[in-house]
Structures are given as C-alpha cells and as structure tokens.
Amino acid sequence: MYRDNSLMPKEAVRLAVLGTLSQAGSLRYADLAGAIRHFTSRIVGPSLDLMGTSLELLRYDGLIEALDGTGMEDNAVLTVTPAGKKEFETLMRSNIRAPSSDDLNKLIITLKLRFLHLLDHQDRQDQIDLLADLYETELARLQDLRRHHEGESGHLTEWLDHDIAQVEARLRWFQDLYQRT
C-alpha cells in the first residue's frame, strides 16, 4: 500500500483472492486462479502487474490455506485463514487513489462493490461514502477544467461535458446506494 493507505496492484489481487474465497468458502487452486484471472482481465485487460501475485505467496503469508493437499501441484482446496479474513477487511477499508479513471482504480472499485456485502453495516456505509467522496472530488476537478477552457474552439469542452455527466451519474448512484444500504 502507498503511504496514503491506497491499494497497489498486489493488494488488488489479494483483495480479489480473499474476497472470492470469503464469498465461496473454499475453491480448488485451479478454479480460484482461473476466477481471479477471468475477473481482473475483464476489468483491466491482461496485466503482468496483476498476474504476478501468486496464490502460493498468499499461502506463505498465512492468508489462505490448503484444506487437502499442498497447493498448485495437487490442485488443493483453498480457504481463507483468520489472518486472511482480517487482511480482507483491512483491504476493503483502504483508500482509493484519485483520479478514479485509471484501470487499477476501476478494478479496486469493482472489487469493493463485488464484496461490499461481506462487511458489516457501518463499514459498508463508510466505503460507499469514501467512493462518493472520490467522485465528488473528480467532479470538482473536471468542472474546474471545464470553466477554465470555456469558450475555446475545438472539442475539449464537449468531451469534458461528457465526462462530467458520467461522473455525476456515478455520484448519484453511490448516493442512492448509501440510502439503500
């Protein structure tokens, strides 16, 4: 994690693994690896940064364990350890770097939404609030840029209007989610 407690690619994969296992209970090594690869590649495309994190490293760190067998070589059934559950909660509560338009942040936001229901009510509300704040900041940044370039020729302000509309829609969605949660 960065000094601001925001997630890096390694932590995003940890969140994906620990959340998937927390939700499923247990999975065979190959099934878990395939599920993580499928999910992350559909959000950010193929990425060496994301695929470089090994399930074996999470086993070594004591975050997941084999219920039968040893790991990859015998396609063991894997589950989350108590330390892994604690790490999952820490990762879910972590910050997201601004701006939210880069691929890593998109993956982290998607993972947080995928596993949000696994947190207690207050932590869910806090995370939704954090995500709404992220979009409020991005909206202010885009609106300031739009004002600065008002009246210029070209298509920049038109593109910014498009981006502003998307961010406003996401912000409304998170505000609605906060009310429903």
Image (cartoon, rainbow, N blue to C red):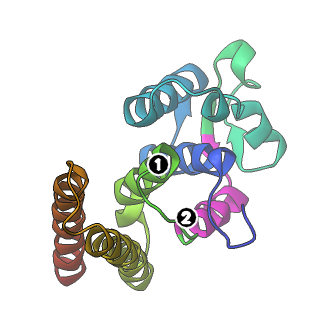
- Label pair 1/2, CB-CB below 8 angstroms: yes
The three-letter amino acid code for the residue at tag 1 is: Asp
50 up-or-down from 16: above or below: above
Give the label on residue 72, or none.
Answer: none
65 up-or-down from 125: above or below: above
Name the residue at 66% across, 62% down: 87
Q: Quadrant of the C terminus?
A: bottom left
Q: Quadrant of residue 174?
A: bottom left
22 up-or-down from 139: above or below: above
Q: Earlier in the sequence, mark 1 or mark 2?
A: 2
Label 2: how many residues lie within 10 Å, few (<14), some (14-19) or many (20+)? some
Q: Position of residue 159 (x, y in %)?
A: 21, 52
The residue under label 1 is 102
The residue under label 2 is 97
Judged left or right of residue 155, residue 4 is right
* Viewer-side residue, 154 vs 25: 154
